[in-house]
Image: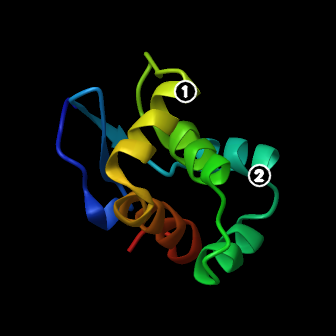
Amino acid sequence: MSRPANPLRGEASFQINGQDLLLRPSFENLVAAEEELGSLFALVERASSGSLRLNEITALVWHCLATDARPDRAAVGAAVMAMGLVQATTPVRAILTQALQGER
């Protein structure tokens, strides 16, 4: 990761294969995620009810990776599983909070 995540911008870090990568919920990244996953509001509702699926977590994280050399989804999914679903909710929460609240 070239610089530390800025939580005030909704950024978070995410580790894949021992490398810290930056998650940035930019407009473009969120639009791409929404195209695949459907409404972000519905995604937030599923997350708040504990109904978020593993493939949704993986897709959201993958779309929000701020890197030109984006790892494949299998690597992102493996990283989610390695950290566990509970710990994976931390970066997902940062992304969804940014989407709901905007920049502070």
Residue 16 spot, x, y in % from top left? 33, 32
Give the residue type that dot 2 points to.
Leu
Q: CA distance from mark 2 to mark 1?
A: 17 Å
Give the residue type that dot 1 points to.
Ala
**For mark 1, what is the residue?**
74
- Answer left or right for 36 relative to 95: right
Mark 2 and mark 1 lie on one chain; the one further toward the N terminus is: 2
Residue at (77%, 72%) from the top-left corner?
A: 42
Q: Is residue 21 above or below residue 37?
A: above
Mark number for residue 37? 2
Q: Is residue 84 above or below residue 68?
A: below
Q: 15 or 35: which is nearer to us?
A: 15
Q: Please name which of the two marks, 2 or 1, marks the residue nearer to the observer.
A: 1
Residue at (74%, 52%) from the top-left corner?
A: 34
- Answer left or right for 82 relative to 73: left
- Answer left or right for 64 relative to 50: left
Determine whether the residue tagged by mark 1 lies in a helix, strand or loop: helix
Quadrant including the C terminus:
bottom left
Q: Quadrant of residue 87?
A: bottom left
Residue 27 spot, x, y in % from top left? 60, 50
Residue at (21%, 29%) from the top-left corner?
A: 18
Determine whether the residue tagged by mark 2 lies in a helix, strand or loop: helix
